[in-house]
């Protein structure tokens, strides 16, 4: 803010001197050289930094920028004895720059507020004493203590205490989250009331807060095509404008001098100076990046991280969305609904399945172990082989068992009848005999049905499920929630093939939303990858372009609305700025636009575009859509 105050104070001082000069000129009729001296004082007070920047850039070979245009235009104004106009060009330019700085600070504030997530220290519990250490020094498995009012510095699991956590900086929502012993907690959350002891399960570099900060810091590296175009446009546009101004200052008056013997060089130099001021590309160079930057900040307020402005353009053009099923469209809270024994009693079927899933943390495995309830003697397990996308082969008490889907039993030539009930079917068999099966069900998230309706309202009429689950379950889920297409019984590599086949249809931008490790390749392959940030795997978050920090899938339509709003504002600014400048440039070249109109076409248009760009920051309506 000091920089902004400095600009404003200098502009005010220069303006006061400017008024004094006008009063003296009108009342006392001072000599032109005294008027020049007074105006030079005002000019240097308001614009010495612009002069210095132009000189410095020229010394580095960067000649053609807005600073150069301002200097050339104002020198020309002084040369034609338009002293007051030269001063006012610089004063109003500084006011415009101050306004720009304010707008950038506001938009940056939404993002840099996330930097407050960075923990200053962690309270490490060591030998029954609490020591304040750098979070990066804490190792996995060590215990930290978090007092009320403090940020949680590292991801981990609560082993003692209970509290309410403020997760607004992560999720964008003010609702407190209650945690107690056994609950996972994320770094960046603020402990509200109780003392918590937490066992760290990730080093700082892999923690939620570190990943968020890394994403935010790198977001500006990925520029949108529109943003890159404006940068290249300004690079070539400015030299062309300078050349055009030189030609305007020399050619017409030379022709008039030759043909009519009238000296109008001063008039055309003035027109050329106005031409330079009008043509300054500030409105585009500032407002377009500001729109994208503000949009990323606005998304952060909603608990949505967009990894760069290049993705905003694509999000606005999404026409198709594919979803993972488990954990994305469904809760992932699996529960055993039935155990059936065929060639064994059902207790034995459950026993073999529980032992097979002992080492697995998959939600299905957890549901089987929770249903089994008894303690598992891992010494009885001599070998466990996980077969990707099919199941597990287990050696228990020196005998082999198969626990998995129909493909696993089919490949091992086990004679069995495939079960058609709705749910995930886990078959259990020895290497020679089918023993029985377990049915596991998963509940559809309540927000999914309104989600699909909102997507249809946004003209996204093509929705797809990609899942490793069986066809009957996938088809039932799709029918219930209104999904158009289903790809079922897919291995991880099959998901990539399925998304590639969809991409070949070339029906517009294709997004994919998922949360698991096996979703990472698909998230990278899709035009836009959307990952769950709270419960999603690190691999999925790394691969995605958009991250929903609280796993709230209903935010997908909101981020699309925000992206469309940003792109609308960007195009409004481009069309408005170019149209006004072209009109005033023509008027200036013909002698109908003086320096005052030129100032409006530069500073005025830039300020209007900046005000319009700042609308990207305001997401209250979108937030209200979420809450309703």
Image: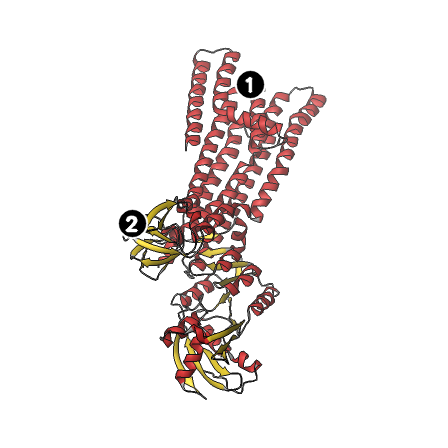
Asked whether the residues under the numbered discs 1 and 2 touch, taking CB atoms below 8 Å apart as contact, a structural biologist would say: no
Horizontal placement of 603 versus 72: left or right?
A: left
The image shows residue 516 at horizontal and vertical percentages of 48, 64
Horizontal placement of 581 versus 353: left or right?
A: right
Relative to 464, does residue 42 appear above or below in the rendering? above
Residue 313 in sight here = yes
Quadrant position of residue 412: bottom right
Q: Quadrant of the N terminus?
A: top left
Count the marks: how many?
Answer: 2
The residue indicated by pointer 1 is: 81
Relative to 261, does residue 67 appear above or below in the rendering? below
| Numbered tag placed on residue 310 in the rendering | none
Which of the two residues, 594 or 235, is positioned nearer the viewer here? Answer: 235
The image shows residue 468 at horizontal and vertical percentages of 51, 72
Relative to 453, does residue 150 appear above or below in the rendering? above
- Residue at image location 56% in from the left, 61% down from the top: 526
Q: Quadrant of the C terminus?
A: bottom left
Q: Residues within 10 Å of mark 2 (few under 14, many from 20)?
A: some
Residue 423 in sight here = no
| Numbered tag placed on residue 148 in the rendering | 2
Which residue is situated farthest in the bottom direction here? 343
Q: Residues within 10 Å of mark 1 (few under 14, many from 20)?
A: some
- Residue at image location 49% in from the left, 86% down from the top: 434
Q: For the residue labelled by badge 1, is the local secondary structure a helix, a strand or a loop?
A: loop
- Residue at image location 50% in from the left, 12% down from the top: 34
């Amino acid at each position: 803010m000091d920089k902004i105050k400095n600009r404003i104070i200098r502009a005010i001082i220069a303006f006061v001197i400017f008024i004094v000069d006008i009063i003296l000129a009108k009342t006392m009729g001072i000599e032109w050289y005294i008027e020049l001296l007074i105006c030079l004082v005002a000019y240097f007070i308001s614009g010495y930094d612009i002069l210095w920047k132009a000189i410095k850039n020229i010394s580095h070979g960067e000649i053609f920028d807005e600073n150069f245009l301002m200097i050339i235009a104002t020198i020309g104004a002084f040369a034609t004895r338009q002293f007051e106009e030269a001063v006012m060009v610089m004063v109003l330019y500084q006011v415009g720059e101050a306004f720009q700085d304010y707008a950038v600070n506001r938009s940056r504030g939404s993002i840099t507020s996330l930097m407050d997530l960075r923990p200053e220290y962690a309270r490490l519990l060591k030998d029954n004493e609490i020591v304040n250490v750098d979070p990066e020094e804490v190792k996995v498995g060590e215990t930290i203590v978090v007092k009320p009012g403090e940020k949680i510095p590292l991801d981990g699991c609560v082993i003692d205490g209970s509290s309410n956590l403020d997760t607004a900086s992560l999720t964008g929502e003010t609702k407190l989250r209650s945690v107690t012993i056994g609950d996972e907690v994320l770094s960046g959350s603020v402990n509200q009331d109780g003392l918590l002891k937490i066992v760290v399960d990730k080093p700082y570099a892999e923690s939620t807060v570190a990943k968020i900060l890394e994403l935010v810091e790198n977001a500006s590296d990925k520029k949108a095509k529109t943003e890159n175009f404006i940068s290249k446009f300004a690079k070539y546009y400015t030299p062309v404008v300078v050349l055009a101004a030189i030609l305007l200052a020399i050619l017409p008056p030379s022709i008039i001098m030759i043909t009519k013997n009238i000296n109008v060089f001063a008039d055309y130099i003035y027109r050329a100076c106005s031409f330079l001021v009008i043509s300054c590309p500030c409105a585009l160079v500032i407002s377009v990046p500001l729109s994208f930057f503000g949009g990323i900040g606005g998304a952060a307020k909603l608990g949505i991280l967009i990894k760069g402005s290049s993705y905003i353009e694509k999000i606005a053009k999404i026409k198709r969305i594919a979803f993972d099923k488990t954990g994305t469209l469904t809760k992932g809270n699996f529960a055993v609904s039935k155990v059936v024994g065929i060639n064994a009693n059902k207790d034995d079927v459950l026993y073999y399945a529980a032992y097979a899933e002992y080492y697995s943390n998959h939600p299905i495995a957890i549901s089987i172990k929770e249903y089994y309830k008894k303690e598992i003697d891992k010494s009885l397990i001599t070998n466990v082989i996980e077969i990707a996308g099919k199941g597990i082969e287990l050696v228990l008490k020196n005998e082999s068992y198969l626990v998995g889907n129909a493909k696993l039993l089919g490949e091992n030539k086990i004679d069995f009848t495939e079960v058609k009930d709705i749910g995930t079917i886990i078959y259990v068999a020895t290497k020679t005999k089918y023993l029985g099966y377990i049915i596991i069900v998963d509940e559809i998230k309540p927000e999914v049905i309104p989600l699909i309706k909102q997507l249809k309202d946004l003209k996204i009429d093509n929705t797809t499920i990609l899942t490793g689950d069986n066809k009957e379950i996938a088809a039932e889920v799709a029918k219930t929630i209104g999904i158009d297409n289903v790809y079922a019984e897919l291995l991880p590599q099959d998901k990539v093939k399925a998304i590639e086949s969809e991409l070949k249809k070339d029906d517009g931008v294709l997004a994919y939303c998922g949360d698991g490790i096996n979703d990472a390749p698909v998230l990278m392959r899709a035009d836009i990858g959307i990952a769950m940030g709270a419960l999603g795997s690190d691999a999925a978050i790394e691969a995605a372009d958009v991250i929903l920090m609280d796993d709230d899938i209903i935010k997908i339509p909101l981020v699309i609305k925000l992206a469309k709003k940003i792109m609308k504002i960007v195009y409004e600014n481009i069309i408005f700025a170019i149209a006004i400048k072209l009109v005033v440039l023509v008027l200036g070249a013909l002698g109908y636009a003086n320096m005052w109109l030129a100032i409006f076409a530069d500073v005025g248009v830039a300020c209007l575009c900046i005000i319009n760009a700042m609308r990207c920051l305001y997401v209250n309506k979108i937030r209200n859509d979420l809450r309703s």
